[in-house]
Amino acid sequence: MLGHLSTPELSSLLALSPSIDQIGTQERIARIQARSIKGAAKIQGLRMALSMIDLTTLEGKDTPAKVRQLCFKAQHLHDQAADLPTVAAVCVYPTMVGVAKKALGNSGIKVASVSTAFPSGQAPFEVKKLDTLYALDNGADEIDMVVSRGRFLSGDYQFVYDEIAAIKELCSTARLKVIFETGELDSLDQVRKISDLSIAAGADFIKTSTGKIQPAATFPVVLTMLGAIKDHFDKTGQMIGMKPAGGISSSKLALQHLLMVKEVLGEAWLSNEWYRFGASSLANDLLMQYQKQLTGKYQSAAYFSID
Amino acid sequence: MEVLKTYKLYIGGQFPRTESGRSYAVLSQSGQHIANACQGSKKDIRNAVQVARKAQASWAAKTAFNRSQIIYRIAEMLEARKGQFLEELQALGFDLKSATQEVETSIDRCVYYAGWADKYQALLGTVNPVASSHFNFSVPEAMGVVGVVACQQTALLGFISQVLPALIGGNSVVVIANQKLPLCAITFAEVLATSDVPGGVVNILTGSVEEMLPTLSGHMDVNALSLAQLDIAIVEKAQTEAVENLKRVMSYSIDFSQSRAQGLSYISDFQEIKTTWHPIEQIAGGAGGY
């Protein structure tokens, strides 16, 4: 495996993970949230957020028809508005990757597949491997894997590291997003530690949550993860992507997240190559706000397609 | 030193201050400063419509009997707070006699509309004769979110006379209260908050009609407007802005103290008629099943 770390090496790496100043984090977030984005900047921000969405359906009741419908929505966000961007990717279960791939054709929209026994990650590694290979064989461009939170919390860092590194190896050209499920990790220190661990193991993106558990992508958690990305970049010059997922359902929140990325990581991260929103209902709120900016009138959900 | 009360807004079952942070002085007829009220803004309207939309479906889905009980409960709570309303009206400059009359008529009107909850469907609904093998019937349904600009001449009665018919018919409402006489509207909100009306079904804002009405009439998620005693120019402007999503605009010029200021027609003003064609099965050449 590439750059594989031994247990002592991993321990010394994790020993360097800083502990997070919770009060300082909250104060910084409060300052970001106090800002107001209006006019042309708001329009630009809304368009940018739309282009960063991983339009997601991860339900037990998903059907090929539902996925095809979502793929149509991904390409036609709101045809009444001219020149809208498309979303970045459609995010589905491995069984739906083939359907999504075909429905999206050469639209340029990526297909992301959750993997490794999403959402719990409670399966033997062999199963996780097959899960991932199945998604890749069907054409997934991106793999969203979940980490073994139980193992992480009980201190078995080597196990978690090896798992991520092994899945990364399977991915070859597909980009790997590593989902932490921060709602299960209890403290910001843990979030920082697992961020450092995942980045060392080869994650291309780090992602907050599965969307199945609350709290999900809270500001403190996202800021902590952005800090890990920044420190890694300062040390190595290598960029890592960020994907908050779950709980970001309004334009206001999305714009505040963008502000935070710009402030912590800089302009380079403000594209869908390095930043994504995992969301299903966010798209329509962004579209409604966008229309509000253009027409001056508050919008009704009745005039926007559900998915 | 006398501390003057600042009356807050009523949105989603809560009493927030306006997001704009502004307030204005409420004066009695003799020009005395008797209280402060929130100067509501466009964004308050937006927030109110948002919660009104959320609350509407479950309000309309309640049984007619339950809605009746809740409106009747409002009458009971009004009765219990009668003294406070009388004080407020007198502070605003009404004499005791006309204040008493206004409050008592308001209570009567609550009881009156509470009684309509399980009856208007039967009177507004029809079975229609059609020339095919169909059972064809029409039923009234709530329109959705109704924007109300409360009567600018009365402090309580006009407000109640406009809000209740929309409410009993399963709509949720966003009300811009009487600009000069807002106290009773907010005290009425305190009544609502203690009478089982679910949060968000009635939302009450105070402030400038001129400033807030365009937001309401242009809002794509508001289904109808109820206006009263407004200048024709303001009504026409609201009608023009309402065109975009085909809002129904009702404009009343009636004196709400009259007994004909209540009735079934005020309920049907905010009902949409849905017609259903139901095929009638012909079994073994017999007569239709209906």
Image (tube, helix red, strand yellow):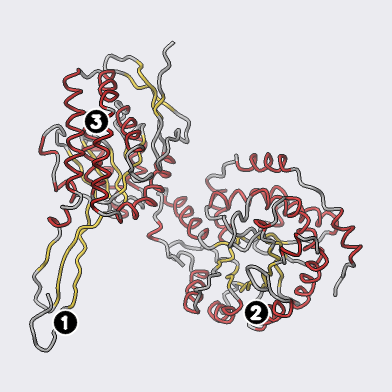
Q: Earlier in the sequence, mark 3 or mark 1?
A: 3
Across and down, in percent, residue B100 comes to 19, 24
Q: Residue at x 36, y 52 (%)?
A: B221
Q: What amino acid type should be assigned to the residue bearing mark 3?
A: Glu
Q: What amino acid type should be assigned to the residue bearing mark 1?
A: Glu
**Mark drawn on residue A135:** 2
| Residue found at the far top of this picture | B1
Q: Residue at x 16, y 37 (%)?
A: B253
**Mark drawn on residue B281:** 1
- Mark 1 residue crowding within 10 angstroms, few (<14) / some (14–19) / many (20+): some
The span from disc 3 to disc 1 (Cα, nearest Å) is: 54 Å
Instruction: Please state if A73 lies on the left or on the right of B263 as rendered.
Output: right
Q: Chain of mark 1?
A: B
Would you name the residue on which mark 3 appears?
B79
Q: Chain of mark 3?
A: B
Instruction: Please state if A96 lies on the left or on the right of A156 as rendered.
Output: left
Residue A93 vs A203, above or below: the answer is below
**What quarter of the picture does the C terminus of chain B occupy?**
bottom left
Dots 2 and 1 on the same chain:
no
Across and down, in percent, residue A197 comes to 80, 61
Residue A24 vs A7, above or below: the answer is above
Q: Chain of mark 2?
A: A
**What quarter of the picture does the N terminus of chain B occupy?**
top left
Nearer the observer: mark 2 or 1; the answer is: 1
Q: Is mark 2 in CB contact (under 8 Å) with mark 3? A: no
In the foreground, A263 or A11? A11
Instruction: Please state if B243 lies on the left or on the right of A164 as rendered.
Output: left
